[in-house]
Amino acid sequence: MTLPERASANEVRGLVHLARKRLLRSVDADRDVPGLERLFRAQHRALTARRRAPYVWAGTILVTALAVLTFRSIFSRPRHQLAYALRPARYEFSDGTVISLRTGANLQVLSANEYAPHLRLTRGEADVSVVHRADSRWDFSAGPFDVAVVGTAFELNWDPERQTFSLDLRQGAVSVTGPVLDGPLLLHAGHRVSVFLETGRVAIDLAQPSTSPPRSPSPVQVALPAMAVPQAEPSGSSAAASDAPPAPRAAPKASWRALVGRGRFAEVIMQAQAMPIAGCVSLCSAADLRALGDAARYTGRAELAERAFLRLRERFAGSPESTVAAFLLAHTYEAQHRLQLATTWYERYLSEAPSGEFSAEASAGRARTAAPH
Protein backbone atom coordinates (compact mmCIF):
# COMPACT_ATOMS: atom_id res chain seq x y z
CA MET A 1 0.00 0.00 0.00
CA THR A 2 1.30 3.44 -0.92
CA LEU A 3 0.43 6.37 1.36
CA PRO A 4 -0.50 9.76 -0.08
CA GLU A 5 2.44 12.18 -0.01
CA ARG A 6 0.66 14.69 2.25
CA ALA A 7 -1.45 12.24 4.36
CA SER A 8 -2.14 13.48 7.92
CA ALA A 9 -1.98 11.34 11.05
CA ASN A 10 -5.84 10.98 11.16
CA GLU A 11 -5.90 9.93 7.53
CA VAL A 12 -3.23 7.32 8.20
CA ARG A 13 -5.28 5.98 11.16
CA GLY A 14 -8.37 5.78 8.92
CA LEU A 15 -6.45 3.77 6.35
CA VAL A 16 -5.22 1.42 9.05
CA HIS A 17 -8.84 0.94 10.34
CA LEU A 18 -10.04 0.01 6.84
CA ALA A 19 -7.19 -2.40 6.45
CA ARG A 20 -8.07 -4.10 9.68
CA LYS A 21 -11.66 -4.65 8.51
CA ARG A 22 -10.49 -6.44 5.40
CA LEU A 23 -8.32 -8.83 7.36
CA LEU A 24 -9.84 -12.23 7.86
CA ARG A 25 -8.24 -12.63 11.26
CA SER A 26 -7.70 -10.33 14.20
CA VAL A 27 -4.40 -8.56 14.71
CA ASP A 28 -2.35 -9.31 17.79
CA ALA A 29 -2.18 -6.15 19.96
CA ASP A 30 1.47 -6.86 20.85
CA ARG A 31 2.31 -6.60 17.16
CA ASP A 32 -0.23 -3.93 16.24
CA VAL A 33 1.07 -1.10 18.46
CA PRO A 34 4.77 -1.34 17.53
CA GLY A 35 3.79 -1.63 13.86
CA LEU A 36 1.72 1.53 14.05
CA GLU A 37 4.59 3.38 15.73
CA ARG A 38 7.00 2.33 12.96
CA LEU A 39 4.47 3.44 10.34
CA PHE A 40 4.06 6.91 11.89
CA ARG A 41 7.83 7.36 12.29
CA ALA A 42 8.43 6.45 8.64
CA GLN A 43 5.71 8.87 7.54
CA HIS A 44 7.24 11.62 9.69
CA ARG A 45 10.73 11.07 8.21
CA ALA A 46 9.36 11.16 4.66
CA LEU A 47 7.50 14.40 5.26
CA THR A 48 10.51 16.01 6.97
CA ALA A 49 12.85 15.02 4.11
CA ARG A 50 10.47 16.46 1.52
CA ARG A 51 10.26 19.72 3.47
CA ARG A 52 14.06 19.96 3.75
CA ALA A 53 14.84 19.07 0.13
CA PRO A 54 14.24 22.58 -1.34
CA TYR A 55 16.46 24.12 1.34
CA VAL A 56 19.24 21.59 0.68
CA TRP A 57 19.17 22.32 -3.06
CA ALA A 58 19.07 26.05 -2.46
CA GLY A 59 22.05 25.82 -0.11
CA THR A 60 24.02 23.74 -2.62
CA ILE A 61 23.34 26.23 -5.41
CA LEU A 62 24.31 29.15 -3.15
CA VAL A 63 27.60 27.54 -2.09
CA THR A 64 28.46 26.71 -5.70
CA ALA A 65 27.73 30.26 -6.85
CA LEU A 66 29.88 31.71 -4.06
CA ALA A 67 32.75 29.37 -5.00
CA VAL A 68 32.57 30.41 -8.66
CA LEU A 69 32.51 34.10 -7.79
CA THR A 70 35.45 33.70 -5.39
CA PHE A 71 37.48 31.82 -8.01
CA ARG A 72 36.83 34.46 -10.63
CA SER A 73 37.72 37.30 -8.27
CA ILE A 74 41.03 35.65 -7.34
CA PHE A 75 42.23 34.21 -10.64
CA SER A 76 40.83 36.64 -13.19
CA ARG A 77 41.52 40.30 -13.66
CA PRO A 78 39.06 42.80 -15.01
CA ARG A 79 40.02 43.77 -18.51
CA HIS A 80 39.89 47.52 -18.45
CA GLN A 81 40.58 49.54 -21.56
CA LEU A 82 43.28 52.17 -21.85
CA ALA A 83 41.94 55.56 -22.80
CA TYR A 84 43.85 57.33 -25.53
CA ALA A 85 43.68 60.56 -27.49
CA LEU A 86 44.71 60.99 -31.11
CA ARG A 87 46.47 64.27 -31.69
CA PRO A 88 47.94 65.23 -35.05
CA ALA A 89 50.29 62.30 -35.80
CA ARG A 90 50.45 61.41 -32.09
CA TYR A 91 48.74 58.85 -29.84
CA GLU A 92 48.64 59.61 -26.11
CA PHE A 93 47.53 56.77 -23.79
CA SER A 94 46.21 57.10 -20.26
CA ASP A 95 49.16 55.17 -18.77
CA GLY A 96 51.62 57.74 -20.16
CA THR A 97 52.65 55.82 -23.29
CA VAL A 98 53.17 58.09 -26.31
CA ILE A 99 53.51 57.11 -29.98
CA SER A 100 54.50 59.73 -32.55
CA LEU A 101 54.08 59.03 -36.27
CA ARG A 102 56.34 60.26 -39.04
CA THR A 103 54.82 61.73 -42.19
CA GLY A 104 52.98 59.07 -44.18
CA ALA A 105 52.91 56.52 -41.34
CA ASN A 106 49.73 54.64 -40.50
CA LEU A 107 49.03 53.04 -37.10
CA GLN A 108 46.02 50.96 -36.01
CA VAL A 109 44.99 50.28 -32.40
CA LEU A 110 43.80 46.66 -32.53
CA SER A 111 43.29 46.38 -28.77
CA ALA A 112 43.58 48.88 -25.92
CA ASN A 113 43.37 46.28 -23.16
CA GLU A 114 45.45 47.63 -20.28
CA TYR A 115 47.29 44.32 -19.76
CA ALA A 116 47.92 43.44 -23.42
CA PRO A 117 47.59 46.40 -25.80
CA HIS A 118 48.08 45.48 -29.46
CA LEU A 119 48.90 47.97 -32.21
CA ARG A 120 49.74 47.53 -35.89
CA LEU A 121 52.02 49.73 -37.99
CA THR A 122 50.89 49.20 -41.57
CA ARG A 123 53.46 51.54 -43.09
CA GLY A 124 55.98 54.24 -42.25
CA GLU A 125 57.90 55.02 -39.07
CA ALA A 126 56.67 55.41 -35.50
CA ASP A 127 58.55 56.74 -32.48
CA VAL A 128 57.35 54.68 -29.50
CA SER A 129 57.79 55.39 -25.79
CA VAL A 130 56.06 52.73 -23.63
CA VAL A 131 55.74 53.30 -19.89
CA HIS A 132 56.97 50.29 -17.93
CA ARG A 133 54.40 48.32 -15.92
CA ALA A 134 55.17 44.88 -14.52
CA ASP A 135 51.66 43.56 -15.27
CA SER A 136 51.35 44.74 -18.87
CA ARG A 137 52.96 43.69 -22.15
CA TRP A 138 52.54 45.77 -25.28
CA ASP A 139 52.54 44.09 -28.66
CA PHE A 140 53.39 45.88 -31.90
CA SER A 141 52.93 44.36 -35.35
CA ALA A 142 54.78 45.72 -38.37
CA GLY A 143 54.09 43.77 -41.51
CA PRO A 144 54.80 40.09 -40.70
CA PHE A 145 56.97 41.01 -37.70
CA ASP A 146 55.93 41.13 -34.07
CA VAL A 147 57.59 43.20 -31.33
CA ALA A 148 56.88 42.29 -27.67
CA VAL A 149 57.46 45.21 -25.32
CA VAL A 150 57.37 45.66 -21.53
CA GLY A 151 58.66 49.21 -21.14
CA THR A 152 60.99 50.85 -23.60
CA ALA A 153 61.59 53.51 -26.24
CA PHE A 154 62.33 52.72 -29.87
CA GLU A 155 61.77 53.68 -33.49
CA LEU A 156 59.81 51.19 -35.58
CA ASN A 157 59.67 51.20 -39.37
CA TRP A 158 57.90 49.05 -41.96
CA ASP A 159 58.14 49.63 -45.71
CA PRO A 160 55.58 47.37 -47.44
CA GLU A 161 56.82 48.24 -50.93
CA ARG A 162 60.43 47.32 -50.23
CA GLN A 163 59.45 44.63 -47.69
CA THR A 164 61.88 46.11 -45.17
CA PHE A 165 61.56 46.09 -41.38
CA SER A 166 63.76 48.03 -38.97
CA LEU A 167 63.82 48.77 -35.27
CA ASP A 168 66.17 51.16 -33.46
CA LEU A 169 66.07 50.55 -29.69
CA ARG A 170 66.98 53.50 -27.48
CA GLN A 171 65.94 52.18 -24.07
CA GLY A 172 64.80 48.94 -22.44
CA ALA A 173 64.52 45.58 -24.21
CA VAL A 174 62.25 44.01 -26.81
CA SER A 175 61.78 40.61 -28.41
CA VAL A 176 61.28 40.50 -32.19
CA THR A 177 59.83 37.54 -34.11
CA GLY A 178 59.12 37.16 -37.78
CA PRO A 179 60.24 35.55 -41.05
CA VAL A 180 63.96 35.05 -41.74
CA LEU A 181 64.71 35.38 -38.01
CA ASP A 182 65.67 32.11 -36.31
CA GLY A 183 63.45 32.31 -33.26
CA PRO A 184 62.88 35.35 -31.01
CA LEU A 185 65.52 38.04 -31.42
CA LEU A 186 66.22 39.77 -28.10
CA LEU A 187 67.45 43.36 -28.41
CA HIS A 188 68.41 45.90 -25.77
CA ALA A 189 69.34 49.57 -25.62
CA GLY A 190 71.64 50.66 -28.43
CA HIS A 191 70.75 47.82 -30.79
CA ARG A 192 69.34 48.30 -34.27
CA VAL A 193 68.02 45.54 -36.51
CA SER A 194 67.05 45.69 -40.19
CA VAL A 195 65.46 42.79 -42.06
CA PHE A 196 65.21 42.73 -45.87
CA LEU A 197 62.64 40.11 -46.80
CA GLU A 198 63.35 40.12 -50.54
CA THR A 199 66.98 39.09 -50.04
CA GLY A 200 66.60 37.41 -46.64
CA ARG A 201 69.37 39.57 -45.18
CA VAL A 202 69.40 40.48 -41.49
CA ALA A 203 71.60 43.33 -40.26
CA ILE A 204 72.04 43.83 -36.53
CA ASP A 205 74.03 46.77 -35.19
CA LEU A 206 75.13 46.01 -31.64
CA ALA A 207 77.27 49.12 -31.20
CA GLN A 208 76.78 50.82 -27.85
CA PRO A 209 78.57 53.81 -26.31
CA SER A 210 81.05 52.69 -23.69
CA THR A 211 82.99 54.65 -21.07
CA SER A 212 85.47 51.85 -20.41
CA PRO A 213 88.86 52.00 -22.17
CA PRO A 214 89.23 49.68 -25.15
CA ARG A 215 90.70 46.35 -24.28
CA SER A 216 93.36 44.66 -26.30
CA PRO A 217 91.98 42.03 -28.62
CA SER A 218 92.01 38.50 -27.33
CA PRO A 219 93.80 35.72 -29.20
CA VAL A 220 90.44 34.52 -30.50
CA GLN A 221 89.55 37.87 -32.06
CA VAL A 222 92.82 38.16 -34.02
CA ALA A 223 93.85 35.12 -36.07
CA LEU A 224 97.52 34.97 -37.03
CA PRO A 225 98.92 32.55 -39.63
CA ALA A 226 101.17 29.73 -38.52
CA MET A 227 104.82 30.86 -38.53
CA ALA A 228 107.99 28.82 -38.60
CA VAL A 229 110.59 29.32 -35.89
CA PRO A 230 113.24 31.71 -37.34
CA GLN A 231 116.71 30.23 -37.89
CA ALA A 232 119.93 32.04 -36.96
CA GLU A 233 121.25 34.16 -39.81
CA PRO A 234 124.89 34.60 -40.69
CA SER A 235 126.33 37.80 -39.24
CA GLY A 236 127.02 39.20 -42.69
CA SER A 237 123.39 39.10 -43.68
CA SER A 238 122.11 41.29 -40.84
CA ALA A 239 122.41 44.51 -42.87
CA ALA A 240 120.57 42.97 -45.80
CA ALA A 241 117.86 41.77 -43.49
CA SER A 242 117.47 45.24 -41.98
CA ASP A 243 117.06 46.77 -45.43
CA ALA A 244 114.41 44.28 -46.46
CA PRO A 245 110.81 45.50 -46.28
CA PRO A 246 108.85 44.15 -43.31
CA ALA A 247 106.81 41.04 -43.99
CA PRO A 248 103.11 41.78 -44.50
CA ARG A 249 100.99 41.16 -41.40
CA ALA A 250 97.77 39.18 -41.63
CA ALA A 251 94.70 41.34 -41.48
CA PRO A 252 92.74 40.53 -38.30
CA LYS A 253 89.42 38.82 -38.75
CA ALA A 254 86.26 40.55 -37.68
CA SER A 255 85.40 40.05 -34.01
CA TRP A 256 82.60 37.69 -33.17
CA ARG A 257 80.58 40.58 -31.80
CA ALA A 258 80.83 42.33 -35.16
CA LEU A 259 79.86 39.13 -37.00
CA VAL A 260 76.78 38.74 -34.79
CA GLY A 261 75.95 42.38 -35.52
CA ARG A 262 75.96 41.63 -39.24
CA GLY A 263 73.78 38.57 -38.79
CA ARG A 264 76.60 36.12 -39.62
CA PHE A 265 75.70 33.76 -36.81
CA ALA A 266 76.74 30.55 -38.58
CA GLU A 267 80.23 31.95 -39.19
CA VAL A 268 80.73 32.54 -35.46
CA ILE A 269 79.68 28.99 -34.66
CA MET A 270 81.94 27.55 -37.39
CA GLN A 271 84.95 29.42 -36.01
CA ALA A 272 84.16 28.19 -32.50
CA GLN A 273 83.82 24.61 -33.74
CA ALA A 274 87.21 24.89 -35.44
CA MET A 275 88.90 25.66 -32.09
CA PRO A 276 86.96 23.32 -31.08
CA ILE A 277 84.02 24.27 -28.84
CA ALA A 278 85.64 22.78 -25.73
CA GLY A 279 88.66 25.00 -26.23
CA CYS A 280 86.55 28.06 -26.87
CA VAL A 281 84.44 27.82 -23.73
CA SER A 282 87.66 27.37 -21.72
CA LEU A 283 89.79 30.08 -23.36
CA CYS A 284 87.55 32.62 -25.11
CA SER A 285 87.09 36.09 -23.69
CA ALA A 286 83.87 37.12 -21.98
CA ALA A 287 82.87 39.15 -25.06
CA ASP A 288 83.39 36.14 -27.35
CA LEU A 289 81.47 33.79 -25.07
CA ARG A 290 78.60 36.27 -25.08
CA ALA A 291 78.76 36.51 -28.89
CA LEU A 292 78.89 32.71 -29.21
CA GLY A 293 75.87 32.34 -26.94
CA ASP A 294 73.93 34.96 -28.91
CA ALA A 295 74.81 33.33 -32.23
CA ALA A 296 73.66 29.98 -30.85
CA ARG A 297 70.37 31.48 -29.60
CA TYR A 298 69.63 33.16 -32.92
CA THR A 299 70.19 29.90 -34.83
CA GLY A 300 68.11 27.77 -32.46
CA ARG A 301 71.09 25.95 -30.86
CA ALA A 302 69.81 26.17 -27.31
CA GLU A 303 72.26 23.63 -25.85
CA LEU A 304 75.29 25.52 -27.20
CA ALA A 305 73.86 28.83 -25.95
CA GLU A 306 73.31 27.34 -22.49
CA ARG A 307 76.86 25.96 -22.45
CA ALA A 308 78.42 29.28 -23.47
CA PHE A 309 76.46 31.34 -20.94
CA LEU A 310 77.09 28.91 -18.07
CA ARG A 311 80.84 28.98 -18.76
CA LEU A 312 80.69 32.75 -18.94
CA ARG A 313 79.07 32.78 -15.50
CA GLU A 314 81.66 30.37 -14.13
CA ARG A 315 84.83 31.93 -15.56
CA PHE A 316 83.90 35.60 -15.19
CA ALA A 317 81.85 35.51 -11.99
CA GLY A 318 81.00 38.97 -10.68
CA SER A 319 81.61 40.73 -13.99
CA PRO A 320 78.93 42.71 -15.87
CA GLU A 321 79.06 40.07 -18.62
CA SER A 322 78.31 37.37 -16.05
CA THR A 323 75.26 39.27 -14.80
CA VAL A 324 73.90 39.69 -18.34
CA ALA A 325 74.50 35.97 -18.93
CA ALA A 326 72.06 35.21 -16.08
CA PHE A 327 69.32 37.06 -17.95
CA LEU A 328 70.22 35.42 -21.27
CA LEU A 329 70.10 31.99 -19.64
CA ALA A 330 66.62 32.75 -18.30
CA HIS A 331 65.49 33.88 -21.76
CA THR A 332 66.97 30.73 -23.34
CA TYR A 333 65.23 28.45 -20.84
CA GLU A 334 61.89 30.24 -21.29
CA ALA A 335 62.10 29.74 -25.07
CA GLN A 336 62.51 26.00 -24.36
CA HIS A 337 59.51 26.06 -21.96
CA ARG A 338 61.80 25.09 -19.05
CA LEU A 339 59.91 27.48 -16.85
CA GLN A 340 61.28 26.55 -13.44
CA LEU A 341 64.86 27.14 -14.59
CA ALA A 342 63.80 30.34 -16.35
CA THR A 343 62.23 31.67 -13.14
CA THR A 344 65.37 30.82 -11.16
CA TRP A 345 67.66 32.71 -13.55
CA TYR A 346 65.32 35.70 -13.88
CA GLU A 347 65.36 35.98 -10.09
CA ARG A 348 69.15 35.61 -10.00
CA TYR A 349 69.57 38.40 -12.54
CA LEU A 350 67.25 40.69 -10.56
CA SER A 351 69.13 39.96 -7.35
CA GLU A 352 72.45 40.86 -9.03
CA ALA A 353 71.18 43.85 -11.03
CA PRO A 354 67.85 45.11 -9.61
CA SER A 355 68.18 48.28 -11.72
CA GLY A 356 70.04 46.73 -14.64
CA GLU A 357 69.33 47.27 -18.32
CA PHE A 358 67.20 44.10 -18.44
CA SER A 359 65.41 44.57 -15.10
CA ALA A 360 62.04 45.42 -16.68
CA GLU A 361 62.14 42.45 -19.04
CA ALA A 362 63.40 40.16 -16.26
CA SER A 363 60.52 41.19 -13.96
CA ALA A 364 58.01 40.47 -16.70
CA GLY A 365 59.72 37.17 -17.51
CA ARG A 366 59.63 36.09 -13.89
CA ALA A 367 55.90 36.91 -13.75
CA ARG A 368 55.30 34.83 -16.88
CA THR A 369 57.31 31.80 -15.88
CA ALA A 370 56.39 31.74 -12.20
CA ALA A 371 52.62 31.87 -12.87
CA PRO A 372 50.72 28.56 -12.53
CA HIS A 373 50.27 26.77 -15.87
Image (tube, rainbow, N blue to C red):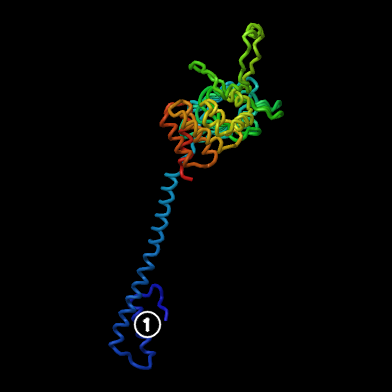
The quadrant of the image that shows the N terminus is bottom left
* In-image side of 362 versus 143 (left or right): left
Q: Quadrant of residue 194?
A: top right
Front position in the image: 59 or 167: 167
In the rendered image, is residue 99 in sight? no
**Taking the image as drawn, is residue 163 in sight?**
yes
Within-10-Å neighbours for mark 1: few <14, some 14–19, many 20+: few
Q: Residue at x 66, y 8 (%)?
A: 244
Residue situated in front as seen by the camera: 352 or 269: 269
Which of these two is toward me, 86 or 210? 210
41 sits left or right of 262 in the view: left
Secondary structure at badge 1 equals: helix
What is the total number of numbered labels drawn onto the structure image?
Answer: 1
The residue furthest left is 30
According to the picture, the residue beneath numbered tag 1 turns out to be: 15
The picture places residue 41, in percent across and down from the top left corner, at: 32, 75
- The amino acid pointed to by label 1 is Leu
Q: Percent x, y for residue 174?
A: 54, 29
Residue at image position (59%, 23%) is 255
Residue 231: give x, y in percent of width and height: 62, 17
Q: Position of residue 107 (x, y in %)?
A: 61, 27
226 over 366 or under it: above or below: above
Q: Nearer the viewer, residue 202 or 137?
A: 202
Asked where in the image residue 16 lies, by quadrant, the reply is bottom left
